[in-house]
Image (tube, rainbow, N blue to C red):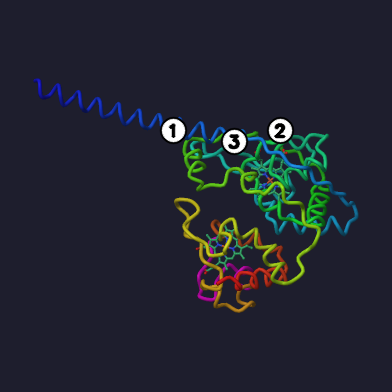
Amino acid sequence: MQVIKTIFKWIGRTILLVISVIVLGYTYIYISTEKRLNKKYRFSETRLAIPSDSQSIEKGKHLYQIRSCGDCHGTSLQGGIFMNDPLLLQISAPNLTKGKGGLSPEYSSRDWIRVLRHGVDKNGKSLWMMPAHESNTLNKDDLANLIAYCQSVPPRNNQLRKLKSIGPIGRVLMKIDRVAVLPAEHINHALPISANPPATVYETGKYLASTCQSCHMHDMKGGSALAPEFPPVPDISAKGAAGRWTEAEFIKTIRSGKTPEGKILRKEYMPWQNMQSFTNEELAAIYTFSKSIH
Ligand code: HEC
Ligand code: HEC
């Protein structure tokens, strides 16, 4: 009897210990992620004149497409639910028009500039999952044209549910930096906007490749899968299979979703269909940039 009692006592203690460790660990993760979610960023605002001529708006439309804004905000800027997983993350990508459910009538160019350059809301807190660390690299003309286009899109009524919460798995992934939830953490807020468009083919490629780098990484060498059920991200630098392709083969791969080796790129993991707005020159520039990396 005594032995059984002792065993039960020890099992009880072990369970209690495990639970305490989990509770303490999660409390620590909760507090430290809460601190990051609520951090306020300070910076000096960028001033920019937004054009209204049709040529600038047309250029802005092209940028909206190749910078993949539409993947999350929709092709008519109507918005959409970006992720709805209570354990991970629940967040909607807002309706960016001034229709019902969209931006407030007072939403100004200053707000657009703040979001796209710094990735923060009115209170200076980082937005969630909005890739402002990519739009932050846009030069003056491109940023102004992009905003001009977005403001020119007619109002769309789309009253989305305003989702914004992060679950326990989301917090753990955020804590170990497996998911870049907060764009403002990845921006150098002191860096002024560039006034110069890229001067060479290589520079153009580097500039445009920011859309690829969120998955293929900064060095274009890819890496492990982005999510549990995803394939690993291939190396598209000179060292990978793509490094052996000609420029024409590289462009054809993005156009057709099929590599010269005959591998079919699955559009759920590699969004090649959404990349069709890139011109051949732009894809060739990205090729030049990736191929320069050894
Ligand atoms: C990966 C998905 C994704 C992409 C791509 C994306 N956004 Fe967003 N965007 C979001 C989400 C999610 C939010 C809301 C963030 C929040 O509420 O914290 C957001 C917020 C915004 C806001 C702020 C709206 C407000 O209420 O203040 C603007 C403006 C915006 N995005 C414009 C753009 C533009 C322009 C592009 C392309 C350069 C773009 N977004 C690309 C997901 C995305
Ligand atoms: C959302 C993440 C994501 C983005 C953004 C992305 N890729 Fe990919 N890419 C992948 C994944 C994942 C694969 C592997 C797909 C598969 O196995 O079906 C891939 C495969 C490729 C391949 C085939 C490589 C090979 O060796 O088979 C090329 C080329 C490529 N991507 C180029 C690009 C370029 C250029 C861009 C930017 C314009 C880009 N990708 C943006 C995730 C991405």
Mark earlier in primary sequence (2, 1):
1
Residue 166: image location, x then y, percent: 54, 36
Quadrant for the N terminus in the image? top left
Mark 2: amino acid: Asn
**39 in relation to 259, above or below:** above
The residue at the point 64 percent across, 71 percent down is 287
Residue displayed at 20% across by 23% down:
9
Crowd around label 1: few <14 · some 14–19 · many ≥20 (10 Å): some
How far is mark 1 from mark 3, CA to CA? Answer: 16 Å
Q: Is residue 289 above or below residue 126?
A: below
Tag 2 residue: 123
Give the x, y percent position of residue 53: 90, 55
Measured as percent of width and height from the top left, residue 171 is found at 50, 38
| Residue at image point 71% right, 55% down | 137
Amino acid of disc 1: Tyr
As rendered, which of 226 and 18 lies closer to the eye? 18
Span colored in magenta? 252-266
Q: Is mark 2 within 8 Å of ligand 1?
A: no
Quick one: label 1 or label 3, which is nearer the N terminus?
A: 1
Task: Find disc 1 in the rendering and name its residue.
Answer: 26
Tell me where residue 141 appears, x and y as whole percent.
Answer: 82, 57
Query: Circle 3 sits on which residue?
Result: 37
Rounded to the nearest angstrom, the CA distance separating label 2 from label 1 is: 27 Å
Query: For the point 73% across and 48% down, which residue is it?
Result: 117
Q: Residue furthest right?
A: 53
Q: Which quadrant of the figure shows ligand 1?
A: top right
Q: Quadrant of residue 277?
A: bottom right
